[in-house]
Image: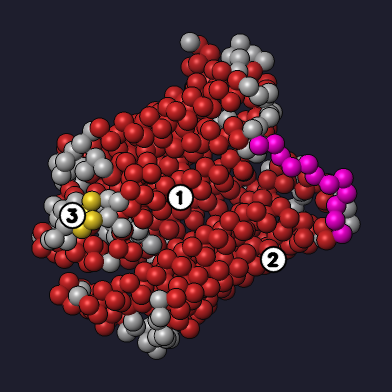
Amino acid sequence: MSTFLTLYGQRLSRDRWQLAIWVITIGLLALLSVTTILKTYGDEASRAEVLRLATATPAILMLRGLVRGASEGAFTFFALFAFISLLAGFMSTFLAVRHTRAEEESGRAELVSATPAGRWAPLAVTVAHGFVANVLVAAALATGLMVGGLEPSGSLVAGAAAGSVGIAFLGVGLLSAEFMSTSRGANGIASALVALAYLLRGFGDATGKVSPDGLVITAAWPSWLSPIGWGQQTFAYTGNRLWPIALPLALGAACIAAAVVLMSRRDIGASVLAGRASRADARASLRGPFSLALRLQQGAIIGWCLGGLATGLLAGALGSAVQQALNGAPSITSVLRAMIQAQGTSMTQLVISVLFEFAGVLAAACCLQAIIRLRQEETAGTAALLAAQPLSRVHLLASFLALGAASVVLVMAFAAVGAWASLIASGDTSNAVTDVWQTAADQLPAALIYLALPAAAFVLWPRWTMPLGWGTLILGVMIGIYGGMIGLDKSVRDLSPFTHTPVPSASGSDWSGGFWMLGIAAALTTIALIAMRRREIGAA
C-alpha cells in the first residue's frame, strides 16, 4: 500500500498543474457558458428558433450535439457536452501515455520495475490516477452547471456522462501505448481516435431523424459507435438516463484489460508495432539543418495539414448548407439575416471565416511544435551534437523557424483547397469560392505569433518553452474564439491574437490588426535570433 501511495503521490506531483488547469477550465467553461446562454437565449422561443435552424442545417450538428428540446438544461447540454467530452478525451489519453509509454521511452519505467513496485504497480496507479482525474472533471462540470442555475439532477447526469467518456479514452490511451513504440506515436493514435469519436458522433447527429416540430433528433447509427455519442444518450435534463454511462465504462475496462494482456507478453520498451529500422547512413538530403528539421517534423506536419484539409471541407460544405437553409426557410433565419447585413458579406463567407479560425488554431499548433521539437532535441542531447559540427546556433534556430513558418502556410493552403473543393462540388459559383484563399491568408498573422513567442521563450527561458507555448495557445483560443460565448469582456478578449484576425467583408479584409501581429511576430523573432548568439546549447 505504501508503494501505491508513493507512486500516486509522484503522479500527482508531476500532474498537479496540468490536472488543475484541465479541471478548472472545464468547470469555468460550463459556468460561463450557462450564464451566457441563459442571458442570450432567456426565453424558450428564441432557443427553439436556434434549434430549428440547427435541425434544418445538419452540418451545424457536427459542431454541437444532439437536439433534445428547448429547455434551458437541454439547450445547454446540446451546446456544450460534445466539446467538454472532447476535452476530457484529450486529457485522459495524454495522461495515460505520459505515465506509460513515455516512461518506458525515457528508461524510468525500467528503473521503477527494479524496485519493490515491480512492473504492475505503476500501471495500476496510472489507472487509478486517470479515474480520479475524470471524477474531478465530472464534479467540475456538474458544479459549474448547477452554480450557473441548472437543476441538480440533470447536471449530475451530464457530469457523470462526461467523466465516463474520459474513462473510456483513458483505456484507449493505455492501449495505444501498448501498440506504439514512442510516446509521440501513441499520442498521435490516441488523439486521432478521440477526434474520430467526435466526428462519428457528429455524423450520427447530423443524419438522425428529426421530429415534426424540429426540436428533437434521434441519433443515427454512427453516433452509437462513439463514446461521446453514448454520453449524449443519457439525455441529461430531459431523460436523465443512467444506463448509457455503462457503455463508455465498459469500453474503458475492456481497453485496460487488453493493455494488461499485451503488457504481460512483451518486454519493457517493446511494443506490438515495432519501430522501423533506420538507415545506417543519412541521405544526402539530410545534410542541412532545415532538411533535418523537416525530417523530424514531417509526420506531425502531414497530420496537421490533413486536419486543415478536413476543416476546409467542412467549412465549404457547412457554408453552402447554411446558405441554402437561409434561402429556403426564411421564417427561422431572421437572426442569421441580421448578422449577414451587419457583416456586409454572404452567409457562406461568414461561416467559412468562422471555421477557418479553427484551421488557424491547427496552423498555430503545427508551428509551435517545431520550436518544441527543437527544445526536445536539446534536452535529449542531440542538439549539442549538431552544435559540435560547423553549424551556428543561429542557423539551427533559423531553420526550425523557417520550417514553422512554412508549415503555417501549408496547413492554411490545405484548408483553402478543402473549402474550395467542397464549394465547387456543391455547385457554388459565388465570390466565396475565390475568397477562400484570402480568408486562409487572414489567419497567418495570428498563427505566426505562436511561432515567434515560443521561439523567444526557447532562447530566453528554455524550461518554459513547452508550457508557455501550449498555455498561451490554449488561453488564446479560450478567450479569443470562445470568449464571446462565455461572456468575457472585450478588453479581455482583445488579449488573444485570434480576436485581431482580419475578417472578410464586402469591402475586403481589414488588416490593421494583422499588420500589428506581423510586426510583433517579426520583433520577437529578431530578439530570439539575436539572443541565440549568446545562448549555450543545453542551457536550462
Q: Is residue 201 above or below residue 484?
A: above
Q: Mark 3 sits on what residue?
A: 216
Q: Residue at x 23, y 33 (%)?
A: 242
Nearer to us: label 1 or label 2: 1
Q: Report how far apart the C-alphas of labels 3 and 1 lie in the structure.
A: 25 Å
- Mark 3 is surrounded, within 10 Å at the Cα level, by few (under 14), some (14 to 19) or many (20 or more) other residues, namely some
Q: Is residue 190 visible?
A: yes
Magenta residue span:
273-284
* In the displayed structure image, the side of residue 172 where residue 335 appears, left or right: left
Q: Mark 2 sits on what residue?
A: 402
Q: Residue at x 68, y 29 (%)?
A: 269
Q: Secondary structure at mark 2?
A: helix
User: Residue 75 in the image: x percent, y percent?
Assistant: 20, 53
Q: Is residue 133 visible?
A: no
Residue type, label 2: Ala
Q: Residue at x 19, y 64 (%)?
A: 52
Q: Mark 1 sits on what residue?
A: 195
User: Residue 379 in the image: x percent, y percent?
Assistant: 71, 42
* In the displayed structure image, the side of residue 418 where residue 118 appears, left or right: right
